[in-house]
Image (cartoon, rainbow, N blue to C red):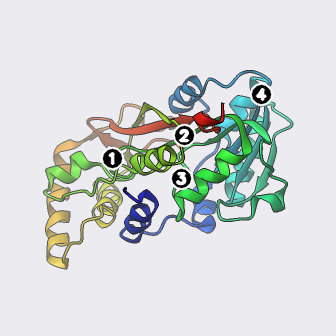
């Protein structure tokens, strides 16, 4: 039998270290909550089928997009994140939307949740949206499962990491490691006697820049984080090819200056096509089927 947790831990050793709380604090400064329309969040909640007035725990809540939308629908929302910056943005988000009563607090996946008053069967639904970059996936899934009475919902990547565009890397001859993170979660849950269901959410990303140099610097990070070891010479050659590819695919941005999905003004230039990121939406009943 495949040990999905062991395989997950081996994969994590080959990846760049995920952002810590300080890293997310810095990233939070790029969100200003002016543009609240979020197709991904709407799709997530449509698939989650959370009823009005249900209690929900949102782990890794970030700026609170889902937490605020759920509170607006009458849900009793508890939201946790390990970043002070993200929690501050959640408070701003709630204030902009006129939402009160969200129980938001600082907590990580690795913390002892009971020390924060998180108890078994505490809420109707537990969710974790795009926040499963954890060292111990089995442990994280167990924590969500224990606290939910009716349903758990998470999203994970279906291919390359969201900050990597395999189309661009293929065009410049750099193979991107495709890990399909959701398969590990599906396998772990299934081996616990649960019956996870999988749907898919497709979100678009529009990259904008003020210069070719800015675009090159931004996309060079894809080369460095693609998961494929490169020598210095191979990296230099890839960057040269990337520069030539960008020359062909960067165009004037018709929406320059307008707020993007984070509320930040868009740059003068953009790619000629939107990037598409695929997410696996996994949901499960927290009780094993033999418990009925």
Q: CA distance from mark 2 to mark 1?
A: 24 Å
Query: Badges 1 and 3: C-beta atoms under 8 Å apart?
Result: no
Q: Give the quarter of the figure containing the N terminus.
A: bottom left
| Mark 3 element type | loop
Residue marked by disc 1? 159
Q: Are marks 2 and 3 in contact (CB under 8 Å)?
A: no
Location of mark 4 (residue):
54
Where residue 90 appears, as percent x and y from the top left, is 72, 45
Q: Earlier in the sequence, mark 2 or mark 4?
A: 4
Circle 2: element type: loop
Asked whether 59 or 11 is in front, the reply is 11
- Percent across and percent down for residue 171 are 15, 50
Sequence-wise, the earlier of marks 1 and 3 is 3
**Image quarter (top left, top right, bottom left or bottom right) of the C terminus:** top right
| Mark sitting on residue 132 | 3
Residue at 27% in and 58% down: 177
Specify the label residue 194 is tagged with: 2
Q: Nearer the viewer, residue 228 or 154?
A: 154
Does residue 252 sit above or below 185 in this rendering? above
Which circle's residue, 1 or 4, is located before the other in the chain? 4
Image-based side of 174 in relation to 100, left or right: left
Placement of 225 over or under 71, stated as above or below: below
Tell me which residue sits at (71%, 65%) in the image: 111
Do tag 2 and tag 4 residues touch (Cβ < 8 Å)?
Answer: no
Q: CA distance from mark 2 to mark 3?
A: 19 Å
Q: Please indicate, yes or no, whether residue 29 appears anywhere in the rendered image.
A: no
Q: Determine whether label 2 and label 1 are within 8 Å by CB.
A: no
Residue 44 in picture, x, y percent from top left: 55, 30
């Amino acid at each position: 039998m495949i040990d999905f947790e062991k395989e997950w831990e081996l994969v994590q050793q080959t990846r760049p270290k995920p952002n810590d709380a300080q890293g997310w604090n810095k990233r939070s400064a790029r969100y200003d909550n002016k543009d609240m329309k979020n197709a991904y969040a709407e799709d997530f909640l449509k698939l989650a089928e959370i009823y009005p007035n249900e209690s929900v725990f949102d782990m890794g809540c970030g700026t609170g997009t889902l937490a605020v939308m759920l509170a607006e629908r009458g849900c009793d929302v508890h939201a946790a994140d390990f970043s002070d910056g993200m929690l501050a943005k959640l408070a701003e988000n709630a204030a902009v939307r006129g939402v009160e009563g969200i129980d938001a607090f600082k907590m990580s996946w690795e913390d002892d949740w009971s020390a924060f008053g998180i108890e078994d069967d505490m809420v109707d639904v537990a969710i974790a949206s795009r926040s499963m970059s954890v060292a111990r996936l089995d442990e994280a899934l167990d924590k969500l499962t224990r606290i939910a009475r009716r349903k758990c919902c998470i999203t994970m990547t279906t291919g390359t990491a969201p900050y990597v565009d395999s189309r661009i890397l293929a065009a410049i001859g750099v193979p991107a490691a495709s890990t399909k993170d959701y398969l590990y979660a599906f396998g772990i849950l299934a081996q616990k006697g649960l019956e996870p269901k999988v749907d898919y959410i497709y979100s678009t990303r529009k990259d904008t820049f003020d210069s070719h140099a800015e675009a090159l610097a931004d996309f060079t990070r894809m080369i460095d984080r693609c998961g494929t070891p490169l020598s210095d010479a191979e990296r230099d050659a890839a960057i040269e090819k990337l520069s030539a590819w960008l020359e062909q695919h960067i165009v004037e941005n018709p929406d320059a200056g307008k707020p993007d999905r984070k509320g930040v003004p868009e740059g003068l230039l953009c790619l000629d096509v939107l990037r598409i990121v695929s997410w696996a939406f996994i949901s499960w009943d927290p009780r094993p089927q033999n418990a009925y």
